[in-house]
């Protein structure tokens, strides 16, 4: 049976895979796409996700470290996202946080980040560049693989 830490680490790898699926091949300027009605741009969403991951790292590592960054280009925010996933992943291994902390980090910042990945995928469709569906259960997701080098889909959706 997998430990809670391994499950959270797998979730981090899933976040990395899902974000890359949502942004891979996005048209130039997608980061600034405005859906209107006060909806955040993809760029603003990734920046917010980075704030959430900074919070997750702070809780998992037990440090007060913050990483305030602003005015990064969209691609740099995506790179920062993967760097922060790696920090959280490393802190999980190094600090072995108690399950109560893991539950709170999962239900808070990590679930928030996954919600926002879905928003980015939806904004891709609204921007006229939808992401091809796939069977995510067949995805090549591996614990510890949290960088931007993610494999493509193995099976199309519905197969």
Image (spheres, rainbow, N blue to C red):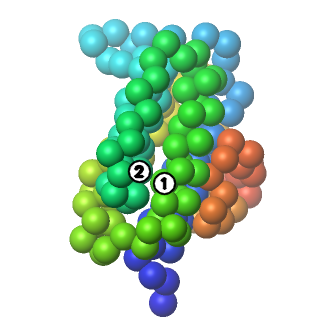
Q: Secondary structure at mark 1?
A: helix
**Mark 2 or mark 1, earlier in chain:** 2
Q: Nearer the viewer, residue 59 or 129?
A: 59
Q: Quadrant of residue 97?
A: bottom left
Residue 30 seen from this side: no
- Depicted 89 relative to depicted 67: above or below: below
Residue 59: give x, y in percent of width and height: 32, 55
Instruction: Tell me whether circle 2 and circle 1 mark residues in contact (CB < 8 Å).
Output: yes
Label 1, on which residue? 88
Q: Nearer the viewer, residue 44 or 61?
A: 61
- Depicted 100 relative to depicted 45: above or below: below
Does residue 113 appear left or right of residue 16 in this picture? left
Disc number at residue 57?
Answer: 2
Q: Tell me what residue is drawn at x 54 percent, y 38 percent.
A: 81
Disc number at residue 26?
Answer: none
Does residue 68 appear left or right of residue 78 in this picture? left
Residue 6: give x, y in percent of width and height: 50, 74
Q: Nearer the viewer, residue 5 or 7?
A: 5
Q: Tell me what residue is drawn at x 39 percent, y 13 percent.
A: 35
Mark 2 neighbour class, 10 Å CA radius: few under 14, some 14 to 19, many 20 or more: many
Residue 129: give x, y in percent of width and height: 61, 23
């Amino acid at each position: 049976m997998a430990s809670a830490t391994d499950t959270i680490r797998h979730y981090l790898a899933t976040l990395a895979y899902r974000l890359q699926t949502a942004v891979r091949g996005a048209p130039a300027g997608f980061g600034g796409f405005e859906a209107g009605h006060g909806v955040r741009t993809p760029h603003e969403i990734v920046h917010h996700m980075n704030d959430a991951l900074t919070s997750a790292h702070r809780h998992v590592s037990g440090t007060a470290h913050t990483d305030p960054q602003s005015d990064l280009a969209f691609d740099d925010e995506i790179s920062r996202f993967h760097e922060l996933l790696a920090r959280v992943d490393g802190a999980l291994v190094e600090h072995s946080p108690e399950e109560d902390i893991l539950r709170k980090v999962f239900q808070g910042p990590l679930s928030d980040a996954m919600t926002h990945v879905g928003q980015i995928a939806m904004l891709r469709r609204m921007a006229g560049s939808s992401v091809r569906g796939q069977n995510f259960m067949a995805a090549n997701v591996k614990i510890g693989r949290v960088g931007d080098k993610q494999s493509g889909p193995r099976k199309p959706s519905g197969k």
